Image: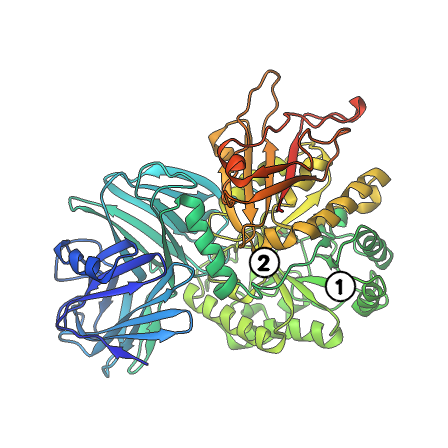
Amino acid sequence: MTALISLLAGLVALHTANTTMVFDAEQGKELQTVYYGARLSDAEVAMTDSYARVRTYPCYGIIGMEEAAYSAIQADGNRTVVLAIESVSQTPWEGGQLLEVLCRDTVYPMSVKICFKSFEAQDMIETWTETVNEGKKPLTLTRFDSGHLPIRVEDVWISTLYGSWANEARVNTEPLTRGWKVIKNIDGARNSQASHGEVMISLDGRPREDSGRIIGAALCWGGNYELRFQTNETDYHHFFAGILPEHDNVSLAKGQSFATPHLALTFSSDGLSGASRNFHSWGRKYRLQHGDRQRDILLNSWEGVYFDINEAGMFQMMDDIASMGGELFVMDDGWFGDKYPRNNDHTSLGDWMVDTRKLPNGVGSLVQAATERGIKFGIWIEPEMTNTVSELYEAHPDWIIKSDKRPIIQGRGGTQVVLDMSRKEVQDFAYGIVEGIMKDNPGIKYIKWDSNSIIAMDGCSNIAYWQGFAAVCDRVRASWPDLVIQDCASGGGRANWGVLPWFDEFWTSDNTDALQRIFIQWGTSYFFPAIAMACHISATPNHTVFRTTSLKYRIDVAMSGRLGMEIQPANMTAAEKDLCRKAIADYKRIRPIVQFGDIHRLVSPYDDKGYASLMYTSPERDKAVAYWWKIRNFYDEHLPRLRCSGLDPEKQYRVTELNRVDLKPLAYEGKVFSGRFLMESGLEIPLTNEVEHSQKTDWSSRVILLEAL
Ligand code: DGJ
């Protein structure tokens, strides 16, 4: 039932289990933010009346000269917006409350609803706005942030993610100082490859993992964005986040409306890991497709055979993954093309017919073969793209994004171009790719949806592109609600909460080198849960960085996310296959803890302490799995004990080492320790894996299972 808030009272509070956001929402005035932080009692909410007010959704033009979250141009050229509150309502929904503040411009016929949705148990609040052009004349929005959060100037630090292809989600931590900090993405199609639309804001100096106040923010949007921090002469850092409006104004005709994407906010007093746990539990429950379903252990063909797809080869890979205990085989790029066979990345995207020279019996025989082996079958597609060397391009050269009169820019393989997803016929085509595959082969259980190009030319509104993408994904999900779909964009280029509602997981990076993956997965885990993070065991020397790590090390790193393999098993020795078989069996034991548990990052690889470590605990804290990876190897090193986190101090835990390769078990294998001891004193981890002399490498790692008695 909607409760209309008493507008005279002024202060309005929105609570979650452990947080509170307070506004001053007096009728006829602008909405103002008063407080965001730890949960307050009603009496304490009243005490915040003594706090300064900051405009919640500052509009350009009249009051103050601070940065605007919103600006518009009226048909008469007037560029000012003044929003006055008309009504405020708070409505319960099953997971929390919906606070809606309806505002109208004081002169022009337009309304803006400023919305906040709380997620009680996850300590998250989503905010967004909805504009309606209530006039007869057109209205043009020139800035339309999802939200603005004032953050009191103290010792505020931010952690953001930057990167590149094969080096996604690197963590950058810095204090906020006077001036501007802007994180902007203009890739068009892959908004988390070079930067991320998420940020952790520490209110208590350099952030720590397990203590200190943290505000986390994630823009739930797949397209171009801008996050801005303005620090000026006021007492506040002003944080803004929204769609990048630079080349993309929104024109609203009479009666038309526009809703911004949601900005998800969380507050935690338990440090970065605390904020991550909130993102993970909210994501699994509300944002990730099938966030409550266990993920399969798979073999993906890409690094094993690249474009060299053929029926016998696929059968062999299926035999191998089935024999190692895997549950799914995914045939990657290279299976399609008729006039232009997809033998490399120069041709064929768009020609989604099976290449019968490679697969004479079609995909059907592969699906059947998988079923016979007791595993599932998945397939790779790249629906939004084509090559200028393709039958599709020959038939529809006008379907691509291009700037009239300019030569087209061609990407991957020298020929890849992006289809204009804003066009209905292109949306139908993209949907039709999935439809064609699924109609022919209803037994397919998994699709890897890739996207390997930037949008290199102006020629389509980026907002319209992503609206078109959403329309296709909605249709796909309506038709195949149970299909598992991986979101891939040259690796982790689409790890964002705007896209994940349609997808079950994302390919974290094309870089499968275990050492670099520790850094990539670390940053990714700030905002995304392990269940969504595809992590595969691959061959050495690694195909991207050419580093040779031990198989044990590669397994131990991949096992901290959604475990899979990305390798040609035919090139593995029997002993290597045995180790993987054992690892897959062990992963099945810990899968519920990894995929549904709570993350506690312990020692950061970025702190250069010689090792990195993190753990997951079951929600009941009766099981935990801890990872310890050495990140360099020098003789005469002295590393601190592994001190756990998130355990029940009163519980007694039995220690079992998983993936053991050492000749002798750990001295404390099978022994029992109290949660308090494990957290305060810790476990001594031998610095090297003690194996036969000829087997020794310079890599060492441990995976330790803790089970309460
Ligand atoms: C990029 C992806 O990240 C890889 O895993 C692989 O699917 C290739 N595309 C295929 O072209």
Q: Is the CB–ligand 1 distance for label 1 below 8 Å? A: no
Left or right for 346, reference 359: left
- At 32% from the left and 80% from the top, the residue drawn is 256
Q: Residue 505 bears which disc, if any?
A: 2
Against 47, residue 289 (above or below) is: below
Q: Nearer the viewer, residue 551 or 650?
A: 650
Q: Secondary structure at mark 1?
A: strand
Q: Secondary structure at mark 2?
A: strand
Q: Nearer the viewer, residue 88 or 395?
A: 88
Q: Position of residue 354 (x, y in %)?
A: 76, 67
Q: CA distance from mark 2 to mark 1?
A: 17 Å
Give the quarter of the figure containing the N terminus: bottom left
Q: Is the CB–ligand 1 distance for label 2 below 8 Å? A: no
- Amino acid type of disc 1? Lys
Against 442, residue 293 (above or below) is: above
Q: Is residue 533 visible?
A: no
Q: Position of residue 103 (x, y in %)?
A: 21, 73
Q: Residue 376 bears which disc, if any?
A: 1
Q: Position of residue 355 (x, y in %)?
A: 78, 64
* Circle nearer the N terminus (2, 1): 1
**Mark 1 nearby-residue class (10 Å; few <14, some 14–19, many ≥20):** many
